[in-house]
Amino acid sequence: MLDKQLSSPEKTNSEKAYRQLREDIVFGAFLPNEKLKIETLREKYGLGAGPLREALARLSSEHLVVLEGQRGFTVAPMSAEDAYDIGETRTLLEIEALRQSFLHGDEDWETQLVAAYHRLVRAEQKVIQGETDFIEWETRNAIFHETMVAACPSQWVMRMRQQIYEQHQRYRHLSRKQSVGVRDIASEHKALFDAAFNRDIQGATEIIRNHIARTTQTVLQTLKAR
């Protein structure tokens, strides 16, 4: 019992460190190739060195952080080649996950899909009106896409899809600000929702392929401009 009480706060702090670091990396608070010094992170987050190192090791396994031997940790680099590769790989996995999900989704899945889409629409309306930030939108966007594939029975497809989605999320943040007022993402999501609800595998395949390709193109343009 005592062991649990002693280990619980550290576990909680490790999870907190992981969530905060991951969010700051994905949403650009830390730049690609930036050094992640433990002392600086301790001051920023008010957490101990142990939980921070554990979080950095976890992020390293997810390829969001690079461990450079004795020199410590840095934010993973970003490149046009990597962005394109991630976009193409996500397309392949997303299409397969959607196909299997459409075949196995039940009434509960449909109900959850409707709810996730409704919340995403609300968030998109708030972004247009300037009433919310991109983090809230991104959270609801992720839930919507996850709900569409939630009925996929293949654990390996889902694991690989989740890993590549998180990598794509980092690049997608670059394109999101560039897309506001230029790209009608709400209409793209509406088309995806309709295809999913109607179990239209062929239609959803074409929509998701174009959906991801547009994002990749915007990311490549943004990286080139930088």
Image: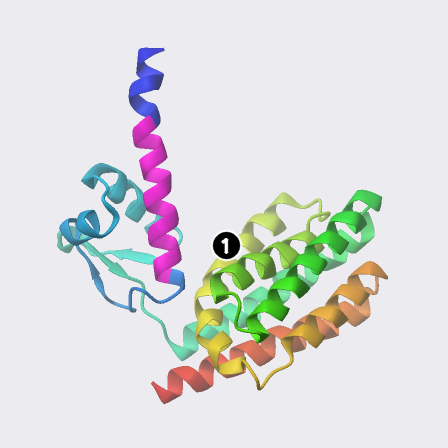
Q: Quadrant of residue 12?
A: top left
Is residue 23 found inside the magenta-colored segment of the image? Answer: yes
Q: Residue at x 37, y 89 (%)?
A: 225
Q: Amino acid at mark 1?
A: Gln
- Tell which residue pokes out farthest to the top in this image: 1
Mark 1, residue position: 163
Residue 182 appears at what percent x and percent y? 58, 86
Q: Residue at x 84, y 45 (%)?
A: 107
Q: Residue at x 48, y 66 (%)?
A: 133
Is residue 115 found inside the magenta-colored segment of the image? Answer: no
Residue 37 appears at what percent x and percent y? 17, 54
Q: Residue at x 63, y 70 (%)?
A: 125
Residue 97 in view here? no
**Seen in the image, is 142 located left or right of residue 47?**
right
Magenta residues?
9-25
Reply above or below: 15 against 127: above
**Seen in the image, is 125 located left or right of residue 200?**
left
Looking at the figure, which quarter contains the C terminus? bottom left
